[in-house]
Amino acid sequence: MLEDMERNQMQCRDFREFADSYLSDELLVETNHEVIKHLETCTDCRRELAARRDLRRKLRSGFESAPDLQLRKEVAGTATAQLRDVALSRAPLSAARYMAIAASLLIVAALGFIVVQQRWRVQRSAVLTASVVGDHRDCALNHRLDERPIDLHEAGSKYDRAYINLVNAVMSEDRLPAGVELVDAHSCVFKRRRFGHVILKYHGQVVSVLVTDIEAQDHPGSTGVTEAIADAQLDDFRLAYFETRRHAVFVVSGLSDAENLSIAQAIEPSVSRHIMDAERIADVRLKTYSQTDKL
């Protein structure tokens, strides 16, 4: 009986699967209770949960304080005043005034949609970052993934062209810091997200270069030019990342901020070119298939 109870208790790996849903209040009551029971006895998972909560708070705070995402007071004030005038007035609206009010409401609605969309992107970023750290920890460090990794070329043929020759893109230019060694390369899956994974070693630390696809609709109007390199920290790991139109590239390690960032800066030009070439080829093929279907 005791052995059955121990088997039924939530393990750390189970907790990591549920952590983001727990923070978002999306779990069933029973599962929520299991998470709480596990946290009462597991110091490591309490630390991880605190780190994830702190990351979400920082992302949310950065979003809410971004000047470009604030609704201008004069716009909101104008719309409010017009609606109040309509409510207090018994006179029929002229067509011109009706159109002006409708236009104001559309602007407010559009800005509101942008805010909602940006909040969703903040949420997606937190979940993606947690998955990246989880893959680095469970694959590169502890070798305990549930699904067996596959060859990058095979993954590139089946899932994403960006994985083909990814190792060459990471190692091609002689810009990596002296002493960086290639350890392994494959494609792996963590929490149902597939990554192209190149594992390096530098100053005795394992370094993961992780490439994954992101939703194209998250980048409206993107020209394919990569985002500037940014960095962050989760748990005891340093992250540096950059994006193309449909992919995110992460460098994760236990190195210092400066050392981790130096690797990301070294690989960014060649990896970005490689991924954007793969995206263009995929676009051409998709267009060709679409035209063929129409014939």
Image: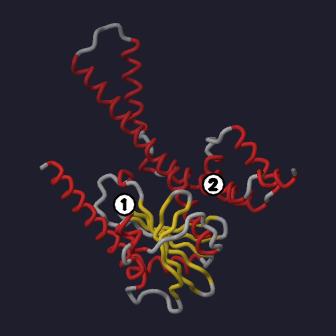
Q: Is residue 174 left or right of residue 225?
A: right
Q: Is residue 79 left or right of residue 121?
A: left
In the current view of this chain or complex, which residue is farthest to the right?
2
| Position of residue 12 measured from the top left corner of the image (x, y, whole percent) | 72, 59
In the rendered image, the vertical position of residue 282 relative to residue 111, given as above or below: below
What residue is rendered at 47% in x and 70% in y? 187
Name the residue beneath numbered marker 2: 17
| Position of residue 193 measured from the top left corner of the image (x, y, whole percent) | 50, 59
In the rendered image, the vertical position of residue 187 relative to residue 50, given as above or below: below
In the rendered image, the vertical position of residue 234 relative to residue 89, given as above or below: below
The reply to whether dot 1 and dot 2 touch (C-beta < 8 Å) is no
Nearest the viewer among 61 and 146 is: 146
Which picture quadrant has residue 292? bottom left
What residue is rendered at 32% in x and 66% in y? 225
Nearest the viewer among 187 and 93 is: 187
Q: Is residue 203 left or right of residue 110?
A: right
> Which color scheme is applied?
secondary structure
Badge 1 element = loop
Nearest the viewer among 114 and 36 is: 36
Q: Amino acid at mark 1?
A: Arg
What residue is rendered at 31% in x and 69% in y? 278
In the rendered image, the vertical position of residue 18 relative to residue 173, given as above or below: above
Badge 2 element = helix
What is the spatial separation of the Cα atoms under label 1 and label 2, in whole angstroms?
25 Å
Nearest the viewer among 223 and 89 is: 223
Name the residue beneath numbered marker 1: 246
Which picture quadrant has residue 132? bottom right
